[in-house]
Image (spheres, helix red, strand yellow):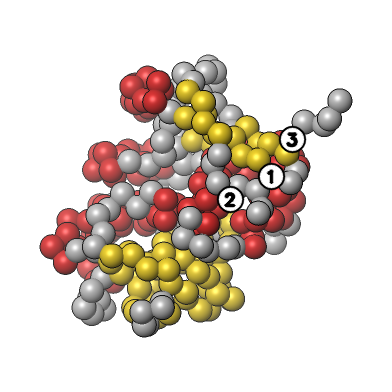
Amino acid sequence: MFILDHLIKNESSAEKGMGRSAAIPARYRRYAKGLATRRAMSRPKCSIVGHHGEIALPDDPPEFKPTGLTRADLVSNVMRDLVAREALSGIAPSEAELQSSLQRTMRFATGDVWIFAYGSLIWNPIFPFAERRVARVFGYRRSFCLRSIVGRGSVEKPGLMLALDTGGTAIGVAFRLPPAAVDQEMPLLWRREMTVGSYAAKWLRAKTTDGDIRVLAFVANKRAANYVQGLSEAESARMIASASGFLGSNLEYLVRTHAGPSEHGIKDTLLARLARRCAQATTPPSS
């Protein structure tokens, strides 16, 4: 088995460190610190073991959230405020623009609404779902092609986030929303995925063992300011291993994003290769 197949070691620990994120204003640092204090005693410290040794995930500084994005964050729109006021002023769309974008996309919805998850939506969907299936889409592949300077990185040390980029194929998990929940959940999903303009929403055909379905997928917006091409896997691994942001470390994102598909029997060679490189980069030399 490749490294990062499972989060296999858990130790209870309190939050440590006194780091500061230059891109996060004081009121959000206080907000996040309160969340960290309430959750610290129940948070597992994770490490991962594989052929190249053990990777210990770094403790997040107290201004960082210990469990990633939450429903409360989407309701309060805290991430949009962070992005708009600190990192990408003038880039984040208004709530009215988000609503208009959602309405344009949903005009093409037919029948059940399926959401195609390929990254954090697999392990942290947040929204309720009536059904899920392993699904494959064509014409797009997973790619760490989006720089993150708030959620999983900073201006000084940007992280990398997944998107679907053109070419190839991708296997993920399709979630079917309960019909009664669509009107309530889609605006929150739009806040999550469309706030920075990194993604474009596309309806795609997906294959499942129970037949083809039509899914809504969030693919890379190649016109976005944080879209990047041409990074080597070594450079990608270096960025992922060292970056942290409001939602936690970029390495934790890779760990969970590798483990999530693996739990559904999905093997992704890109995630496995990056996992190996991060293991090599974070494993101390033997004495």
Which numbered disc flags the more N-terminal residue, 3 or 1?
1
Residues under labels 3 and 2: Cα distance?
Answer: 17 Å
The circle on residue 50 is 1
Q: Position of residue 160 (x, y in %)?
A: 58, 49
Dots 3, 1 in contact, CB < 8 A = no
Amino acid type, label 2: Asp
Residue placed at 24% from the left, 62% from the top?
130
From the viewer's side, name the closer residue of 7 and 71: 7
Judging by the rendered image, the residue that carries numbered circle 3 is: 283
Q: Position of residue 110 (x, y in %)?
A: 23, 79
Q: Position of residue 177 (x, y in %)?
A: 24, 64
Amino acid type, label 3: Thr
Which numbered disc flags the more N-terminal residue, 2 or 1?
2
Residue 16 lies left or right of residue 94; in this view the side is right
From the viewer's side, name the closer residue of 87 and 134: 134
Residue placed at 42% from the left, 50% from the top?
123
Q: Is residue 125 above or below residue 286?
A: below
Q: Position of residue 165 (x, y in %)?
A: 55, 68
Determine the image quadrant of residue 174: bottom left
